[in-house]
Image: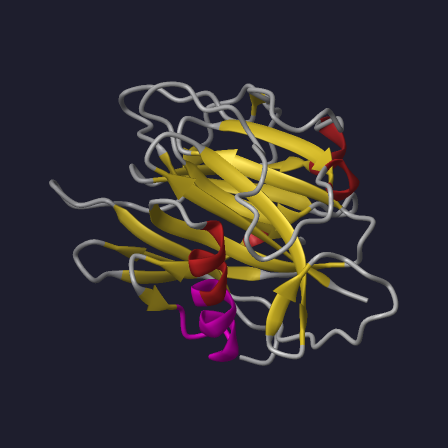
Amino acid sequence: MPTFAAVDIGSNSVRLKIARLTRGHLRPIHEDREVTRLGEGVFRSGFLTPESMAETVKVLRRFHRATQQVVTESVRVVATSGDDDLFEVTSNGMTIRFSENDVRPMGRDAAGVRGVRLREEDVVVSLDVARDEADILMVTDAGYGKRTKLERFNRQARGGQGVRGIRLTAKRGRVVAAFMVSLDEEILLVSTGGVVIRTAVREIASQGRDATGVRVMNLDDGQAVAAVAPVSGSE
């Protein structure tokens, strides 16, 4: 049965919490409990993305109340199998892959545990379920991006600083989006000026972990990449 993994960014720390939704409440993991799978959602800066399910907002709000800490942003909630690897990406291009079994079952009033140790002025921008057959796509606010085979990222213990997933420079900017993709998918990129482009994943170069990426979106002066999202297969 699926669980929910959530990353919270607090005033001084990042916490990861895994729980199951049972009869309207987030509870510790118990195999004998009936679990309602509400699906996957993204909650960022006070709004729910169009592809998310409305019920996910309720899960996040309950999660906020349960943590009893100052939360500035919930990055993402994903459904897991109970035996998956989780993959986090930070704005400075650092990544960490660890087993969800490293996160002990917790109640609704628990504050969670550390998923990745952040350096100064770094924040978590992505949480996803690792899929070995997939690539991890990373895009920066300056319009650069790349995809890297997930097999190049080894599992490690949670709570560390992780490994570099993309090398950033002043020209390349900071990571604004990262998620699992396959070659037959397409993505949408949106700039702060309201420009939207659609591109195939296979047209974005596959590079190693330490590469700086290639231009994936041309930007006018003063503009940046505001959002990146996968295109639904039905569209």
191 lies left or right of 44: left
Q: Position of residue 175 (x, y in %)?
A: 40, 36
Residue 182: % across, % down: 67, 54
What colouring method underlies this structural image?
secondary structure
Q: Position of residue 126 (x, y in %)?
A: 50, 45
Which quadrant would the N terminus be assigned to in this image?
bottom right
Res. 146 visible in picture: no
Nearer to the camera, 120 or 22 = 22
**Does residue 112 sit above or below 153 in this rendering?**
below
Outermost residue on the front side: it is: 109
Which residue is found at the position 47% from the left and 63% from the top? 60
Examine the image and state in which quarter residue 102 appears: top right
Q: Nearer the viewer, residue 63 or 100?
A: 63
Examine the rendering and report whether any part of residue 154 can be seen. yes
For residue 229, above or below residue 151: below
Residue shown at 41% from the left, 19% from the top: 119
- Is residue 58 a member of the stretch shown in magenta? yes
- The region drawn magenta spans 49-61
